[in-house]
């Protein structure tokens, strides 16, 4: 899994590759962390969990990153050290009648580094502008633009 920050007019973009879809989501989230702060201290931070469901892979990635930005603002932490699992739509994944059997699902966790411990720049939002999420050979590639 890897990511690279890319210059983008008035914004910042993350391009990531990984062997699995879950690792790709984690790599893009690590790219979001890197775009937010040049370095992340190893200071302890409490892990927190997030769960997201969406109608497509692209919407799931967008909603996941949007949720990380929300958690940053509410918890006053920089999400780091991301771990993800991604589940495709399936009838067997349904836990109760209110769950959508056609939804993509993500369960993730991140270490919350207190914002006062980092020199962070504000990432305002994730955008659909130029978003790409695709299978390439044996792996996956994503490109995501963030509004700064």
Image: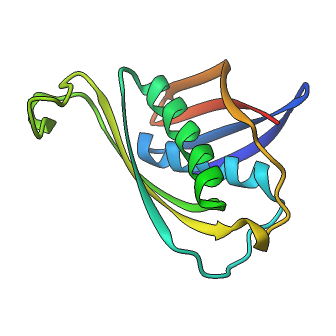
Camera-nearest residue between 78 and 22: 78
Instruction: Pinpoint residue 32: horizontal percent, then vertical percent.
Output: 68, 47
**Which residue is drawn at the image coordinates 9% and 36% (left, top)?**
96
Give the answer, above or below, for where 81 lies relative to 1.
below
Q: Residue at x 15, y 37 (%)?
A: 93
Residue 3, compared with residue 61, is above or below; it is below
Left or right, 145 with reference to 86: right
Report which quarter residue 86 is drawn in. Answer: top left
Residue in the image at 42% along x and 45% along y? 22
Q: Residue at x 69, y 36 (%)?
A: 15
Coloring scheme of the render? rainbow
Quick check: can you spot residue 34?
Answer: yes
Q: Quadrant of the C terminus?
A: top right
Image spot of residue 9 (x, y percent): 90, 25
Residue at the farthest bottom position: 43
Q: Could you tell me if residue 28 is visible in this image?
A: no
Q: Find the residue positioned furthest to the front.
A: 74
With 115 as the anchor, is 86 left or right in this view? Answer: left
Residue 102 vertical position relative to residue 66 in the rendered view, above or below: above
Q: Is residue 110 left or right of residue 145?
A: left
Task: State the count of labels.
Answer: 0
**Which one is nearer the viewer's eye here, 17 or 114?**
114
Residue at the right extreme, as displayed: 10
- Residue 48 x, y percent position in the rendering: 46, 63
Which image quarter: residue 40? Answer: bottom right
Q: Position of residue 54 (x, y in %)?
A: 37, 27
């Amino acid at each position: 899994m890897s990511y690279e920050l890319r210059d983008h007019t008035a914004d910042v973009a993350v391009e990531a590759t990984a062997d699995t879809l879950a690792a790709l989501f984690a790599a893009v989230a690590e790219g979001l962390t890197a775009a937010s702060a040049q370095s992340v201290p190893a200071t302890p931070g409490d892990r927190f969990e997030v769960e997201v469901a969406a109608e497509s892979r692209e919407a799931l990635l967008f909603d996941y990153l949007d949720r990380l930005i929300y958690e940053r603002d509410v918890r006053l932490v920089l999400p780091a050290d991301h771990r993800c699992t991604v589940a495709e739509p399936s009838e067997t994944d349904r836990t109760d009648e209110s769950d959508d059997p056609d939804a993509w699902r993500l369960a993730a966790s991140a270490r919350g580094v207190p914002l006062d411990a980092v020199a962070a720049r504000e990432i305002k939002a994730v955008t659909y502008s130029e978003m790409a999420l695709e299978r390439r050979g044996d792996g996956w590639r994503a490109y995501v633009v963030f509004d700064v």
